[in-house]
Each structure stands twice: as C-alpha cells, then as structure tokens.
Image: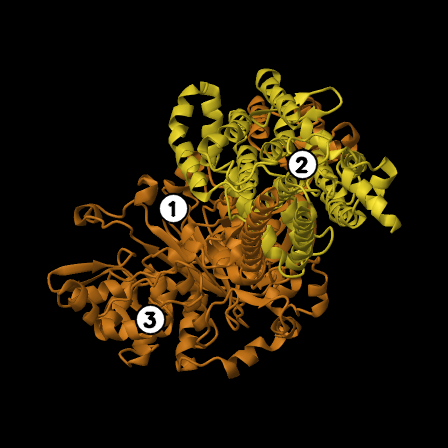
Chain colours: A orange, B yellow
Amino acid sequence: MMLSRDGDWAKMFTRRAMVLGGAQGALISALVGRMYYLQVIESERYKVLADGNRISVQILPPPRGRILDRFGQPLATNKQQFRVLINPEQTNNRVLDTLNSLSSLIELADYERERVRKEVGRHRSFVPITVKENLSWEEMARIQVNAPDLPGVIIDEALTRNYPLKEDAAHLLGYVSSVDKADLNGDPLLQLPGFRIGKAGIEKIQDTILRGNGGSRQVEVNAYGREVRELERREGEPGEDLLLTIDERIQTFAGDTIASHLPVEEQSVSLNVMDIYTGEMLAMVSTPGFDPHIFSRAPTPQEWKELSTDPRSALTNKSIAGRYSPGSTFKMCVALAGLENNVIQPDQPVHCGGHTTLGSNTWYCWKKGGHGSIDMANAITNSCDCYFYEVARRLGVDRIAAMAKKLSLGELTGIGLPGEQRGLMPTEAWKKAARGEAWMQGENLNVGIGQGQVNVTPLQLVTYVARIANGGLMVKPTLVRAHATTAVAAAAIARDNADAAAAAMTTIPSLGIPQAHMAVIQRGMFGAVNGGGTAARAALQIKDPEKKDWKMAGKTGSAQTHRVKRSIRALGEVKQETLPWGLRDNALFVGFGPYHAPRYAISCVIEHGKAGAFAAQIVKDVMEETLRLDPSRKPRVEDQVAAITPAPTPAKNPS
Amino acid sequence: MSDIGFSSRLRRGDMIAPEKVFQVSWSLIFWLVCIFAFGFATLYSAANGKLMPWAEPQLARFIIGLGLLLGVAVIDIRFLMRYAYVIWVLVLVLLIGVELRGVIGGGARRWIDLGFINLQPSELMKPAIVLALARYFHGRGLEEISSPFSLLVPLGLILVPAALIVVQPDLGTALVIIMTAAAVLFMAGVRLWKFIAVGAAGLAAVPIAWTFLHDYQKDRIRTFLDPERDPLGTGYHILQSKIALGSGGVFGKGFMQGTQSRLSFLPERQTDFIFTMFAEEHGMVGGLVLLGLYVLVLIYGYAIAFRCRHQFGRLVAMGITTTFFLYFFINIAMVTGLIPVVGVPLPLISYGGTALLTLMLCMGVLMNVWVHRDVQMASRGSFGYF
C-alpha cells in the first residue's frame, strides 16, 4: 500500500517535472528567439540608433573668403572676435564669485550678470554660458593674465566680417547677415546658428565662392550631452578670396571728395570710374553709404528707421539702381545718331536764337539770346539746346534710341550686382505699348536734350562715355578680376596691362561708329572742359611735371527733377539756390581722360546738385587722383599678390 | 561489501561534516563560479575598467556566499524540515517589521537596516516558502491532498507573505513567490482544476483586497502598474536597452567597448540591466553562453530532484530550481522588452548584496538536498526510521 502510493506519486512527479521542464524550456526558447530578433534581424537598425545616440555631428564653419581690391588691399576681411564664457561646472559651484572677479577686469552691466545667472540655472552645469562678446584684445589679455584666479572662465574666438572702408564701399560690397528661411537650400552650413551669408552687393552675388565648404566634427557624447572624445574631424575649405577691379585708393578718395564738396544733408551722389578698355570699375561710389557692420548683427530698430527713411535713399546703390534723366550728357548720343543717319554734318551750322518753336509750343535754349550759328563740336562744348532740338527733330526718337542702345543707355550693363535697373530709352513703339498714345513730334525735342522719358543709371553713363572715349568699342563694366585662388587669377594678375588698349581693339567688338564721328564728339567734349565751355570747372590742374599737360574731356548735364511751370519760366531763370534741396535739378557730369591717350571714364550724378558744373568740380578732383595713380597702367605682377597676407586659420568651434 | 555499511549510514543521514563536504557537488559549484566570473568581469567593465565600486565588493560577497552555501549544504535536512514552519514565521515577522519600520528606497519599503547589512526579507521568503510547502506536502499522498480543504494551509502559507510583499510594493517579488509556490504545489500533485479555481478566485479577490489597502500603498501599486506616469523613465529605459542589445549584434562590441552602457544611455547597467550591457559587449554569442550556463544549473536542479529519494527533498529541489529559473527568465525577458519592467536582478551577475546572498542561500538549500539525497525521512520530519 505504502509502496504503491509512493510509486503513484513518483510517476506523477516525473510526469509533472517533464511538463514543468518543458514549459521552462519553451520560455527559454522564447528568450533565445527574442535575442535573435534583436541582435541579428534588427541589429542594423539598432546600430544606427546607437550611433545616433552617441555621435553628435558638428559643422565647422569655414572662414569666409576675403574681398580685395585690384592690388590686394582688403575691402572685406574677417576679424577675430573674442568672447568670454563661463563653465559653471568648473567654477566649483561658485559662479557668482567668478562673475565678481571677472567684473573687476571687464565691464559687466547688472543686466548682463543677471542674464548669466539665469542661463546658468537653465542649462546643465557643463554647458558654457556666454558672458560677453566683442571683447577688445586688451580685455581678452587682461582675462588671460588672471586666468589662474578665474576657474571655469573660457576665452573663445570667432570670426566676424570687417569692412575697413565702412560706408565708402557699402553699396558695392554689400554685407553679410544671418540666414533667412528662404535661403536654406540644403547646405548644412546655413543651419549653423550664427552663420552669416552675403545679403547684398558683391557679398551676395559671389556668396557661394566666398562661403567655402563647411568642415565637420564627430564627437562622442554621453547620455547627458557631454563630449567624451572627438571621433573624426574634417576641415572644411575656406572660401576663396575675391580680387575686385576696384582701386581702394580711388574709391576712398572719391568718397572723401564728395564729402568735402557737399554739406552732409546734400550728399546724395553716385560716382563711377571705369577703365575704358577693360571695363574694369576702379571706383563705384554711392552716397550716402551705411555702416555694413550693423547688418552682421541685426540693425537696431532705430538704425533701421534712420536708414530706410533717409530722403537720400541710403539703402539704394545709386550707381546701378538710381534712374536719372541724363540731361545734356545725352547730347553726344544725339549727335552721333545725327551723324550716323546723315541728318547733319559736323561742320553744318544750325542757328540758335535762344528758342525753337514747333507748332504752338516754344522750346528754350539754356542761354538767353541763343548761340547764334553753331556747329556740332561747339554745340557740345557750349551745350546748345537749340542745336539738339533741331537734330532730334530731324532724327525722330527711334533713331536716337538705336544709337543710345549701342552706347548702353537704357540697357542693362550686366555687371551682375543685385538690383540693377534698366532705365528707359523710349521709342514710338514703347509709347504705343505703354501708354496707348502716338508719339508726339515735340517729344523728340525733349529727348534731344536728354529730358522727357529718357532715364539712365550712372553706370550706364560711365559705360557710355567709355565707349565714346575708346572710339566705339563695346566695353562692358566688370567688377571681379578673379578668385585669387584660381589659375585664372594668376594669369590675370600676371597680365601686363600696358597694351590693354591694343588688346581691347582686337578682342572687344566694335560698335561700328566711324572714328571721324567719334573725333568730333571728343573734340566737343574737350572744348566743354578746356575751351571755354560749360564744364570749365573740370579743367585739370595736375602738378606732376610729367603729366601737367594731361587734360580731361567731358560734358555737364542738369536735369529737372520737377516740371517747371511755364509761368515761372516766363519770369526768367529759376534760381536753383532758392529752391529747397528736394526740388533742385540733378547735376551730372561725364568725362574721360587723359585726352591725348584716353584711359579712364568717369560719371557723376549729384541728386539735386543744382547744375552740372558742381558735378564737374568733384569729377575733376577724382580724375586728377586717378591719373596720378594711373592704376590701369600699373603692371600687376604676381609678387604683389604674394604680398597679400594669408587667409586666417579656420575658426575654432566654441567648446 | 564494505561500502554497504557506509551506504546505509548515508541513507540514515548519520554523515559527519567531512563526509558531507565530500558529497557536495563541486561541479555545480564550478559552474556557479563560472557564472559569477562573467558577472565580475561585467561589473569591472561597467565601472570603466575599475574594481571599485562594484566588482570588488561583489567578489567579497560571493566568497561569503560560497561559505553560506556550504554551511547550509551540510545542515541536516531533517533539521530543515522540522523547522521549516519556524523559518517561515521568522521571515514573516521580518516582513511585518519592514512594513512597520523599514527603510524606504526607490519609492518602496523593502529593507530593514540591521546595521551591517540591509536585509530584504522578501528575498528570504523565497527559500522559506519552498521549505514550508515541501514540509507540508512531504508524506502526503495524492488522495490526501485531493480534498480542497487540504489546500487551505498551503494557500495561507503563500498568500499572507505575498500580500505583505505586494503592499511594499514589490509586485515582482510577490509574483515570483506565488509562481514558485505554485510550482511546488504542482509538483506535489495538486489537481490542475484547483489551480484554475484558485487563480480565478484570486483575481476576484483583488478588488476586495484593494479596499483594505492604505492610500499610500494603493499609490505605490498604481505607480507600479502604470509606469507611463514617468514617460522618460521606463519606456526610455527599455528602448535604450533594446538599442544596446541590438547594436551589439552577433559578436558584440567587445569587452569594455559597449557605447550604450559606457556613455550612460543604459540605466542601471550594474544591476537590473546588466544582461543588456553583457550582451552589448559580447553579442548574441555571449548572451547565449550565459543563458547556457543558467540552463546547465537548471539541469542540475532537475537532476538533484530526480536523484533525491524523499518527497521533501524533491519538492525543495524543484521549488529552488523554479525560483532560479524565474530570476533569470524574468530579468532577461524584461531587458529584452518581452515583459514589463519589474525589478528582478540577474542571478550571480547583478550587483547587490541581498540578491546574491539569497541566491547562494537557495543554492545551499539545493545542495543540501543533493548531499542528503539518500537520507530516509519519516513522514513528519522525525529522525526515526521507517
């Protein structure tokens, strides 16, 4: 009995032990299956996740390429900026003590200390907090010297954009500013906090070249975000330096000249200097300028308000975006059209009695009583209006427009700066299309003296006068000589420019204007400056004995900015000085020099500058300086570029 | 034959201590040392290649544990049986003591600070309940336990301590104890329908039991049942654990090369999630080797149960083996995301004194059964003969 009972129990025990063992075996198999699933099937996915956990990729911003003038002088560079940070963890939990010691070395406002105190509370203790930016070198040095007494204080350097010429080249160079949403194009650099890209001028159009390529740094971080070690570092490529055609000395001189000739509130000027054979712009000034640095850090509302409401339109690059009636500076174009279409001969006189009548209307010459009988060269020299009324009447607007187009007036120059305006050279068809009205004969007369619908940019004017000066070569303005790091640059720099004129004649297409026509125009412009004409104030006075005989040829222009009522005109000449600034005529001047061997063309527009003679004064100074420096004839040997200081090392990433 | 006399003396249990030591299964101890060696190396790695703060203290505890194991193994098994209920009562008193004066840690009241050690009575209850139940069923035939009333005492033995542990709250340990006890009941021959009936009754009783709980106890259980109250807690831990395991792949990242654990993405890498760290560094291969060692210990447990000639020893061996199984199964299932997170350590590997010592105690009881496998036991644990 006992034995059989034990036997039953033993059987039961064995059976149930098998069941229990089987169940446990099944559960263990589930574990094995789970391990296989996680560590074999899903392994790749989890490997990616694990790396995502531990690897943090940081973008290293490349230093932005510099912008240099034609001789390598810096126009836009990167300036080292120091800032001081505090690492709360390393201050032995005495952030405030450290701040106190720090404020005995550098100035710290109460609100700055308060901000640091708040930020320390917000972040993990190993995250460095910025205490102050834009430290001077001296402040930085003072902190460095006292570093042993300042646990947890870190000095960090970053690069900021620096424009040595400040407002003198602001419109031309543009500025850099923080990235907008619309700028994002997948370049990871653009998503870097604090990264700046070109937003105007050269900085904008050459941005990709200047920007370079970002490097990257892979660091291993732990679960709390602390860096454990650097896994990989790939340096980026610094942006390429850009060599402009600008001569920094002429650019600055032009700015200074404008400032010395005009009261501040009337400084609204565009002045452009061009090499007539290469099209290289040696100066491109638009005043008033602005401080480009304020855009690197966003401008304050006050600064923005001042700039955007300035009646002199401080934010517009007048050289490419200002549209002005050319006034009398247009007369060379009309004369050339007349010659080309054979409606007048250079020596064929036209009588000027002080006014011209057409139908019931009367058009006046600027000179009361008129010039009498006058030929083409003298009409240009003396800016006789009646002569050009007559030529324009014979030509009609379309033939004038055809010549204007050849000479770049009312056409985009293709210089490539953002915001270039086309201006307007009207034709009969244009009026029909734009206004639905037929062209009136009287309008031809207005166009003949550069008034009416005609409007052009100062850059077009300088191109126009360059094409006259070079005898009709279709030169185009350019700003960029080369990227200093390309092979093209080396070639361009090594090129001997002494025979640029000869080279231009073989490589630049001609406009097909007979040299005899050009000679008449040039003679007329010479007379305007040197032969008792309207631009006598532009007569050069060079002291250098070798160059003292060098002359400039040119043409003034004055253009109404407001229609003058017939009743007022009937009372006699309006005294410009008595008008408020905004109602005065625009003053224009175009010229080239030296006359015996032309090389430089200049255009100048002074908004509300009263009369062209005032522009002539400024151009005279700038032309004298340009001829003194004679940059186009200076050989640009490689040595000079080699002397350019090397680009700074890449910015250290904030730790 | 001369060994007949010896053998019969062994059967009677009259072995002197050196003879018992000779009977100890040193091969089982060898495998336990192997498993611990893995644990030691992993703790060394978890401390970034340092013996402190984990590997060295754990080694000291393991050596003490080995002594404990051998000490328990040579106690006369009839003594264990006779005092099984007393041991149970003592541990129960400790559990009540925890509820009254325990130390709160991790939101639960689990420890008694005895000055030299933080005692966790719920751990001690695991071998205690196995002994008590084995004592109860020893000598009871299948007919004897067929009456439902015969199960009242075992249910009391199980549910009273389980309830005390639930309110600590330590639902994980309570469930391990209930499952261990269930395994003993199952092996003792309790009919299957009774398990189902008791299970159903137990579920029905939960709402009633709930009303008896204090608010703070209810709160603790709610937190336990709904870890989502802390979204960055449990869910994050399990995700990081899975990432660590998965990224370890087949062969692992190498000793001391586990990025997830070294860089602190893995929580509790030296305690509950140590298997994850081990398998991150040594891959599935390492994980399977460790699992294989555990299975080997399980097989020893089954073998001891089968080789044992008395009911008490068989039930104790099965109960201890089941406890051991539940330890490593729940832990690995938890870190691989198969079951919810419960705080069960990985036997012999996880850092922690109580768990290691309890486990060595359990292994000592198992070894005790092995040493006394042939001892003849009276039906109620007397020293007499049949």
Disc 2 secondary structure class:
loop
The C terminus of chain B appears in which quarter of the rendering?
top right
Label 3: few (<14), some (14–19) or many (≥20) C-alpha neighbours in 10 Å = many
Label 2: few (<14), some (14–19) or many (≥20) C-alpha neighbours in 10 Å = some
Disc 1 secondary structure class:
loop
The one nearer the camera, A299 or A622, is A299
Q: Quadrant of residue B23?
A: top right
Label 1 to label 3: alpha-carbon separation? 28 Å
**Closer to the camera: disc 1 or disc 3?**
1
Question: Do the dots labelled 1 and 3 sit on one chain?
Answer: yes
Q: Which mark is residue A404?
A: 3
Task: Residue under label 1, please give it.
Answer: A313
Q: Position of residue B85 (x, y in %)?
A: 63, 26
Q: Which mark is residue A136?
A: 2
Q: Position of residue B183 (x, y in %)?
A: 55, 41
**Closer to the camera: disc 3 or disc 2?**
2
Please, what is the three-letter code of the amino acid marked with disc 1?
Ser
Q: Chain of mark 1?
A: A
Q: Earlier in the sequence, mark 1 or mark 3?
A: 1
